[in-house]
Image: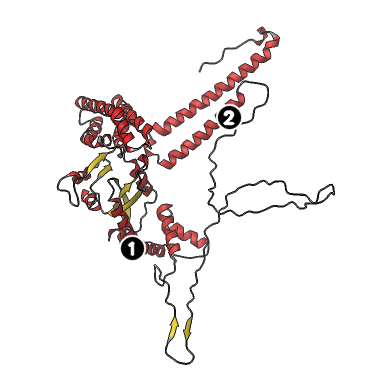
Amino acid sequence: MSALPDIDLSAIPEDQRDAVAALLRETANLKEINRRLEHLVAELNHVVYGKKSEKLDEDDRQLAFEDLQIAVSEAEEQKQDQAPGDAAPKRKRVARRNRGNLPENLPRIERIVEPDSLVCPCGCGQMHKIGEDRTDRLDIVPAQLRVIVTVRPKYACRACTDGVTQAPAPAALIEGGLPTEGAIAHVLVSKYADHLPLYRQSQMLARSGVTIDRGTLADWVGVAGFHLKPVVDRLAEHLKTSTKLFMDETTAPVLEPGRGRTKTGYLWALARDDRRWGGADPPGVVFFYAPDRGGKNAETFLRGFDGILQLDGYQAYNRLTRPSRKGGDPVRVAHCWAHARRKLKEIFDRDGSEIAAEGLRRIAEIYAVEADIRGCAPGQRLSARQARTVPLVAAFGDWLQEQRLRVSAKSRLGEKLTYIHPHWDGLQTFLRDGRVEIDSNSVENLIRPIAVGWSLCTPFISAWKH
C-alpha cells in the first residue's frame, strides 16, 4: 500500500486542523491493521496450501487455525476501537476465544460462601436474601489409586466336622493377579487412546508409591488382548455386513523378542463412517495385524464383505475386484481423489509446474461441490453430483488424457499422471452412488494416530494374530 502524502497542516484553516490530524492518525492506524491482516492471510495460506501442509496432522492444523482466529479477533477488535463515529465511548469487544464448556451432566458440588455477618450495619435487624451470583469452574481430581480387599469368611459347624463353607472367589481377568479389570482398562486406554507408553505409566505409578514394572504392565496388556479378541472379531463381522466401507494400511514397528530390535509389521484398518450423508449405522473401526503388506491379507480380512470399498491406489487391492476373489464376490472400488490431488501437489511444490497447478485447480472445483452438499441425504448428493460434478470430472478426464500425450511418461509429472489414469473408473464411483465419499480421508484420520503411539508390544500383537 502506498504511503500517505505529507500534508501541511498550516495551510488548513485552524478550525479544521484538529479534525484533519485525527483523520490522518486514524488512516495510519487502519493502514497498520490492514498490513497485519494481510500477514495473517499469508500465514493461513501457508497452513492450508504451503509445502508442509501435507505433513500437518488434524490436531496441528486445528491449533494453527485457533491461533489465527485469535489474532484476527484481536485485529478486528483494534479496528473497532479505531473506527470513526460519535464521540461517545464504545464498549470494548471481547476477542472470541474457545474457553471450553461445562456439560450439564457433570456432577456439581455447591459451595455457599456466606458473609461474616447478616446483621444490618445500621442496626435495624437481620438482612434477607435478595439474590445470588453463581460462578462455574472446572475442577479435576487426579486418578485415585486404591486397593480392593476381598474378604471371604469361612464358616464351620461347632457340633460336627462335616466341612467348611466359604463363598467362591469372584471371577477375575487375571486369576490371583494384582490388577482389577478397571486398572487394566486404564492401562489400555492410556496406551492406545492417549499414546502413553508403558514405561511412562510405570513411572507415573511409582510417583504415587506403587512400583509396577513395565514388563508386568505388558503382561496385563497381553491378557487383555487375548480376552478382547472375540469382541474385535464380532465387531469385524458386524462392519462387514455394511454395504460400504473404507480400508487403509500403515506400518507398525513390532518388538521382536530375543533380537533386541523391532521389525516392521502392518496394521490394516477397516472402517465405517456414514455421518456425512446421515446414515443410521454408527461409525466404527477395527484394526487387523499382518506381517506384510500383501494383498492376500486384505482378501483374508474382508472375507464375507461384498459391498463398495473406498481406498487409495495401492495395487495390492486389485485382487479384490477379480472374479477369482476368495471369500466373496468381486468388490466395487471407490478410489480417493485426495490421493490423486496429492500426486499433483508434490510436483507443484517441487517444480511449480503450470500443468500440476491446472490439475489442482480443476480438482478444487470438484471439492467445492462436495463442500456444498456435505450432510445432505444420498439422493440429494447424487442429484447435485450428476448436475454439477459430472461435467467437471469429464473435463478433468479429457484434460488428463491430453496432458498424458504431451508429457513424457518417464518424467516425474508423467509418473504422477500415469498414477491417476489406471484408477479413473474408481475415481468416478462417487458419481454413481450418493453414499460414497469423494476420498478416503475418514479412514486416514483414524489410522494417523498410530504414527504417534507406534510402540506396540508383542503380546498384544500376538493376541491379534492368533
Q: Nearer the viewer, residue 364 or 123?
A: 123
Q: Which residue does the image show at 39% across and 68% down from the upper left? A: 174
Dot 1, how many residues are within 10 Å of its Cα: few (below 14), some (14-19), or many (20+)? Answer: some
SS for tag 1? helix
Furthest-left residue in this view: 324
Give the SS element for disc 2.
helix
Residue 275 in percent (x, y) is at: 37, 42
The residue to which callout 1 is attached is 226
In the figure, residue 421 lies in which quadrant? top left
| Amino acid type, callout 2 | Glu
Check whether the beta carbons of the residues at disc 2 and disc 1 lie within 8 A of each other.
no
- Compared across the picture, whether 160 is left or right of 367 comes to right
- Measure how far apart labels 2 and 1 are at the Cα level: 57 Å
Quickly name the residue at label 2.
77
Q: Residue at x 44, y 83 (%)?
A: 165
The x and y percentages for residue 400 are 23, 28
The extreme bottom residue here reads: 159
Look at label 1 and name its amino acid: Phe
Q: Is residue 67 above or below residue 401?
A: below
Q: Earlier in the sequence, mark 2 or mark 1?
A: 2
Side (left or right) of 15 relative to 216: right
Residue farthest to the right, as pictured: 123
Kindly identify the residue that appears in the image at 33 percent across and 47 percent down.
272
**From what the image shows, is residue 424 above or below residue 220?**
above
